[in-house]
């Protein structure tokens, strides 16, 4: 017995029918959309922006940010002004 009286063979038959009805490309697209939705949900729970929205320049700028909140470029422009 499987899940609630459904055997593994019945599940495989249902899966085969779904693949025949929708096709593999459509199912792949649905899986991709579902995965990105879950990823977005998890990132919103953590209150972090999704990684794909950040550009490499933004990531580099974040790495250069020091504990006092100033970046290297901000410090350089302050030195140039004085």
Image (cartoon, rainbow, N blue to C red):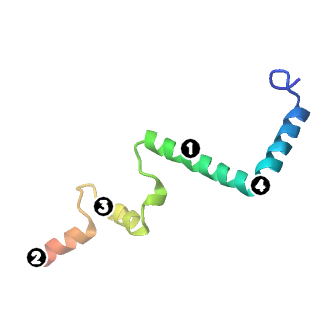
Where's the C terminus, which quadrant?
bottom left
Is residue 51 placed above or below 18 in the rendered structure? below
Mark 4 or 3, nearer chain start: 4
Image point (46%, 52%), residue name: 50
Q: Rounded to the nearest whole Å, what is the CA distance between mark 2 and mark 4? A: 61 Å
Residue 1 in the image, given as x and y percentages of width and height: 89, 23
Residue under numbered circle 1 = 38
Rounded to the nearest angstrom, the CA distance separating label 1 from label 3 is: 30 Å
Mark 2 = which residue?
81
Give whichever of discs 4 and 1 has the lower sequence position: 4
The answer to which image quadrant residue 78 occupies is bottom left
Location of mark 3 (residue): 65
Nearer the observer: mark 1 or 2; the answer is 1
Q: Secondary structure at mark 2?
A: helix
Q: Are marks 1 and 3 in contact (CB under 8 Å)?
A: no
Disc on the earlier residue, 1 or 3: 1
Query: How many numbered circles does the render carry?
Result: 4
The Cα atoms of the two marked residues, 4 and 1, are separated by: 21 Å
Instruction: Label 1, secondary structure: give it.
Output: helix
> In front: mark 4 or mark 1?
4
Q: Position of residue 56 (x, y in %)?
A: 43, 68
**Callout 3: SS:** loop
Judged by depth in the image, the label closer to the viewer, 4 or 3, is 4
Number of residues whose C-alpha sits closer than 10 Å to that of mark 1, classed few (under 14), some (14–19) or many (20 or more) = few
Q: What SS does tag 4 mark?
A: helix
Most extreme residue toward the bottom is 80
As measured in the structure, the alpha-carbon distance from the residue carrying label 1 to the one carrying label 2 is 48 Å
Residue matched to label 4: 24
Query: Relative to the observer, which residue lies in front, 28 or 35?
Result: 28
Q: For the point 37% across and 64% down, which residue is it?
A: 58
73 on left or right of 57: left
């Amino acid at each position: 017995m499987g899940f609630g009286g459904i055997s593994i063979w019945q599940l495989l038959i249902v899966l085969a029918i779904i693949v025949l009805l929708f096709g593999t490309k459509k199912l792949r697209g649905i899986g991709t959309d579902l995965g990105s939705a879950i990823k977005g949900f998890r990132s919103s729970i953590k209150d972090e922006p999704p990684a794909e929205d950040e550009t490499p320049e933004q990531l580099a700028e974040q790495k250069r940010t020091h504990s006092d909140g100033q970046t290297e470029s901000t410090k350089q422009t302050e030195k140039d002004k004085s």
